[in-house]
Every structure is written in structure tokens, then in C-alpha cells.
Image: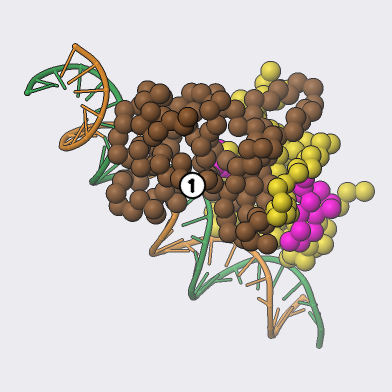
Chain colours: A yellow, B brown, C orange, D green
DNA sequence: TAATGCATTGCAACTATGTTGCAAAATAAG
DNA sequence: CTTATTTTGCAACATAGTTGCAATGCATTA
């Protein structure tokens, strides 16, 4: 059984506030990823810009969402799977960025392949970002 | 035999100017990747901020450098291999970002593994960014 | 449920980052 | 050397992101 919005926040030892509820809800409802700008435009003047920045930071710290690197210099965020905990992310799945519609997909089924690094290099995180055209934009 | 700075610019049908020579030279000398900020701080007031932006854009368009996505919202650029041509990049090698010293390595030897996408998805580009500790920072 | 302490928000101001139009200067071609 | 074209620098603007602080809201305990 899934946890509700409030339970997720409480589990992360965060007080339940309007902005956190609303923003977390946006992530749950959107199956893709969201950028700061998406949230700002969808919430309008409801919340201060600064509040959104701080809420996103808090969520990342608490392991509720994670960042997705993109080549177009726009950081996006997506919900973490249950395995993520505060300060310790486990999101080695592949992200897909559609060049047409701009949607970011989390391909949870596909895990990032293990990369054999040169001697002396140790990895803590692997991000795979595939760009192209998604099934809706063919 | 390697091409010189001027030859590389001419091959890409770009006029040879001070800023282009200097910036391209920085990429050749640095074996890693450079961010806009790196270039701006190293050149000082020699070139206008806008010139650096436009030079980097031009280089990307002409296939001289390519962007590297990072999770920390700082776009970096690195020299393309010879295979890259204008508007058509072939840089499916792995990038390594050291959390300690911040250096970005291009691991040319290692090619990005082919990712099996869901039905209807087509890929034009695959970026693999491994974060961790490099051999100098162990 | 009211009072208290602590976390969170909103505001203001600021810094950094990136873009556009246009005139001046540099480059390439003849 | 002159001309046409490209590139640069400047100014102004637009967007992103950060910080300090007072005011508000949340959680807790009585």
C-alpha cells in the first residue's frame, strides 16, 4: 500500500505545510520529472520563489526526490524510489529526455549498466541520460 | 598528425580571431572539461562575457566541443573527437566527475553501453556520467 | 484548546547566469 | 588597399539561484 502525502513528509521528519504538500503532490501526480520552472508556473503566486527552491532542496536532502542531469542546463527533479534515504540516493535507473516535447521519463525498469572504470577511480553514482524521441512524439 | 588551432578553426569555416584561438587553446591544453566560469576566470577581462558564450555556442554547433550533462547544474564542455562534425556529435563515451576536486574526465576508452528502450522510444544521444573519486583524490 | 518553542515562509536585496540588439572593430576576399 | 561580411563589446534586459531577517505557521505539551 502506498503512503499518502502527509505520511511521506512525516516519515522524513518534516513538518506538514501547504507548500510541501502541494509540491509533493505535483510530483506524485506527474509521472515524469519536474523542473523548478514547472512548479513555479503551475503554482502561480501561491508560493514564493524562495520557498520552492528551499522545498526542493529539502526534498533532495531527505531522499524524497533526486536530481536528473541534463545537457540543456535545466535541472529536473523526480521522485525517488523507496530505496532512497536521507543523504543516500539509489537511482541508478535510466532517464530519458524527449527532444520534441521536453518530457523527462524515469525508466525504472532499466538499470544503469555497471561501468568499468580506470584504476584508482571509484564511483558513488552513475547517471545515464538518453535523449531522443518518446513514444508520444513519433 | 594533429591539426593546429588555426587549422581546426578554418576546417570548421570559422574566421580566426583572438578569442576563438585562446579559448580553443584552453580546451586543447586542458585534458578535462571546462565550464563557462573556468574560461571566464582564466581569461580575466580579456574577452567579454558575451563573447565567451557565443564562442562556446559556435564551437558546439560546429562540432568542435560538446556539452557534458552534470547533476550539479553546471554545464561543462569538452573537445570532441575527430568523428564529430557540425550538428552531429558522436561522443558516446563516459564522463567522470570527481566529487573531490571537481575535475571532469572524458573516459574515451569506455563507450556508453547500448540501452534497450521501451517500444516507441528512439535515441539520438546517450550520456553516461559517473560521479565519485578520481585517481588523484584517493 | 491554549500557550510555547521551533521550523518554515515571505520579503527584500543581492549575485550569478544567460540572452538580444546594435554600433564599432576585426577578419576575409577581391 | 578597399569592400563586404563576421565577430566583438557594450548596454540593457531576462532568468536563476542565494542569504538574512522578521513574521507566520506547525507541532508539542500541558
Q: Residue furthest front?
A: B1
Q: Residues within 10 Å of mark 1 (few under 14, many from 20)?
A: few
Magenta-span inclusion, residue A73:
yes
Residue B94 occupies which quadrant of the picture?
top right
Magenta-span inclusion, residue B39:
no
Task: Note whether B130 is above or below B113 in the view shown.
Answer: below
From where the camera sits, is residue A71 visible? Answer: yes
Task: Note whether A98 is above or below B134 in the view shown.
Answer: above
Q: Position of residue A30 (x, y in %)?
A: 73, 39
Task: Note whether B29 is above or below C12 in the view shown.
Answer: above
Count of picture labels: 1
Q: Position of residue A13 (x, y in %)?
A: 77, 66
Task: Note whether A74 is above or below B14 in the view shown.
Answer: below
Residue depicted at x 70% and y 43% = A127
Residue depicted at x 61% and y 25% = A100
- Using residue C5 as the reference point, say whether residue D8 is left or right of it: left
From where the camera sits, is residue A26 visible? Answer: no
User: Which part of the image, by quadrant, shows the C terminus of chain B?
Assistant: bottom right
Reading the image, the residue beneath label 1 is: B30
Residue depicted at x 39% and y 54% = B41
- Using residue B135 as the reference point, say whether residue B60 is left or right of it: left
**Boundaries of the magenta span:** A72-93
Residue B17 occupies which quadrant of the picture?
top left
Q: Position of residue B137 (x, y in %)?
A: 64, 61
Residue depicted at x 55% and y 31% = B81
- Mark 1 lies on a secondary structure that is loop
Q: Residue furthest right?
A: A1
Residue A134 occupies which quadrant of the picture?
top right
| Front one among A113 and A73 | A113
- Magenta portion: prevailing SS class: loop
Amino acid at each position: 500500500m502506498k503512503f499518502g502525502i502527509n505520511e511521506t513528509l512525516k516519515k522524513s521528519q518534516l513538518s506538514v505545510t501547504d507548500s510541501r504538500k502541494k509540491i509533493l503532490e505535483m510530483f506524485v501526480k506527474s509521472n515524469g520529472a519536474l523542473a523548478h520552472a514547472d512548479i513555479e508556473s503551475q503554482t502561480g503566486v501561491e508560493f514564493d520563489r524562495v520557498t520552492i527552491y528551499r522545498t526542493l532542496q529539502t526534498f533532495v536532502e531527505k531522499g524524497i526526490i533526486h536530481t536528473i542531469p541534463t545537457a540543456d542546463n535545466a535541472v529536473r527533479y523526480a521522485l525517488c524510489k523507496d530505496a532512497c534515504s536521507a543523504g543516500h540516493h539509489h537511482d541508478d535507473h535510466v532517464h530519458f529526455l524527449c527532444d520534441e516535447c521536453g518530457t523527462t521519463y524515469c525508466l525504472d525498469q532499466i538499470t544503469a549498466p555497471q561501468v568499468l572504470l580506470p584504476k584508482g577511480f571509484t564511483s558513488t553514482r552513475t547517471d545515464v541520460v538518453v535523449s531522443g524521441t518518446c513514444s508520444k512524439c513519433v
